[in-house]
């Protein structure tokens, strides 16, 4: 196996698999994990770069104990490539919903943006992408929740922490005293 594949696998294990296993082993509720995953995906694909961490932090502050903060942030991190790939579909969806002009995605578009010649068109394109995200995000949220809930039920059962010794012993103080006297 090439070294780059080994290093990629090591990175994925360290950054994604290990944190997920830690979350599962802590004994979180499957509903809370599914809800947090859905929130993380819906906010993580927000079409403006660099804003998703702030949006997730605001959601965590608002939802408090109803969500699982590490899960939201982990999912936000994992869906970053999806965020990048959904900007154009959100833009086109927003354009079709609003009936707006088609933003040209040509090789000269970035040059026009950099020189400031496409500022009003770019702002309109961002607005269209936001409209597309606003319409699509409830569907992303619902689909993610209903798909991930059964998965988390199985995973939580598989990785639930073992019962503590205090829970497995059903003895009270009087039982212990009697056994000590009998010796």
Image (cartoon, rainbow, N blue to C red):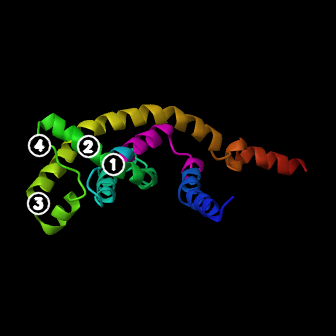
Q: Which of 158 and 171 lies nearest the eye of the viewer?
A: 158
Identify the residue position indicated by label 4 in the image. 101
Q: Which of 9 and 55 lies nearest the eye of the viewer?
A: 9
Point out residue 36 in the picture as x, y percentages from the top left corner: 41, 45
Identify the residue position indicated by label 1 in the image. 45
Q: CA distance from mark 3 to mark 1?
A: 23 Å
**Residue at left offset 44%, top offset 41%:** 32
Question: Do the numbered discs 2 and 1 sit on residues whose CB atoms are within 8 Å?
Answer: yes
Q: For the residues carrying marks 2 and 3, which lies nearer the camera in this image?
A: 3
Question: Do the numbered discs 3 and 4 sit on residues whose CB atoms are within 8 Å?
Answer: no
Query: Which SS class for mark 4?
Result: loop
Q: CA distance from mark 2 to mark 4?
A: 14 Å
Q: Is residue 117 above or below residue 180?
A: below
Identify the residue position indicated by label 3 in the image. 119
Q: CA distance from mark 3 to mark 4?
A: 14 Å
Q: Which mark is residue 97?
A: none
- Residue 91 occupies which quadrant of the picture? top left
Q: Is residue 76 visible?
A: no
Of pointers 2 and 3, the one earlier in the residue sequence: 2
The residue segment tinted magenta is: 23-40
Identify the residue position indicated by label 2 in the image. 90
Point out residue 79 in the picture as x, y percentages from the top left corner: 41, 50
Query: Which SS class for mark 2?
Result: helix
Q: Which of 119 and 82 lies nearest the eye of the viewer?
A: 119
- Magenta region includes residue 24: yes
Q: CA distance from mark 1 to mark 4?
A: 23 Å
């Amino acid at each position: 196996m090439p070294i780059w594949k080994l290093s990629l696998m090591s990175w994925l294990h360290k950054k994604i698999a290990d944190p997920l296993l830690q979350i599962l082993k802590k004994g979180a509720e499957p509903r809370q994990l599914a809800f947090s995953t859905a929130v993380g995906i819906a906010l993580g694909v927000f079409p403006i770069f660099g804003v998703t961490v702030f949006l997730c932090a605001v959601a965590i502050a608002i939802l408090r104990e109803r969500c699982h903060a590490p899960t939201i942030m982990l999912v936000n991190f994992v869906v970053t490539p999806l965020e990048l790939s959904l900007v154009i579909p959100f833009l086109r969806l927003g354009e079709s919903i609003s009936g707006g002009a088609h933003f040209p995605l040509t090789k000269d578009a970035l040059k026009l943006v950099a020189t400031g010649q496409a500022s009003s068109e770019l702002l309109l394109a961002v607005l269209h992408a936001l409209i597309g995200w606003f319409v699509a995000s409830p569907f992303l949220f619902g689909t993610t929740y209903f798909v991930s809930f059964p998965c988390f039920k199985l995973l939580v059962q598989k990785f639930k922490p073992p019962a503590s010794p205090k829970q497995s012993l059903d003895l009270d103080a009087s039982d212990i005293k009697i056994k000590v006297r009998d010796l």
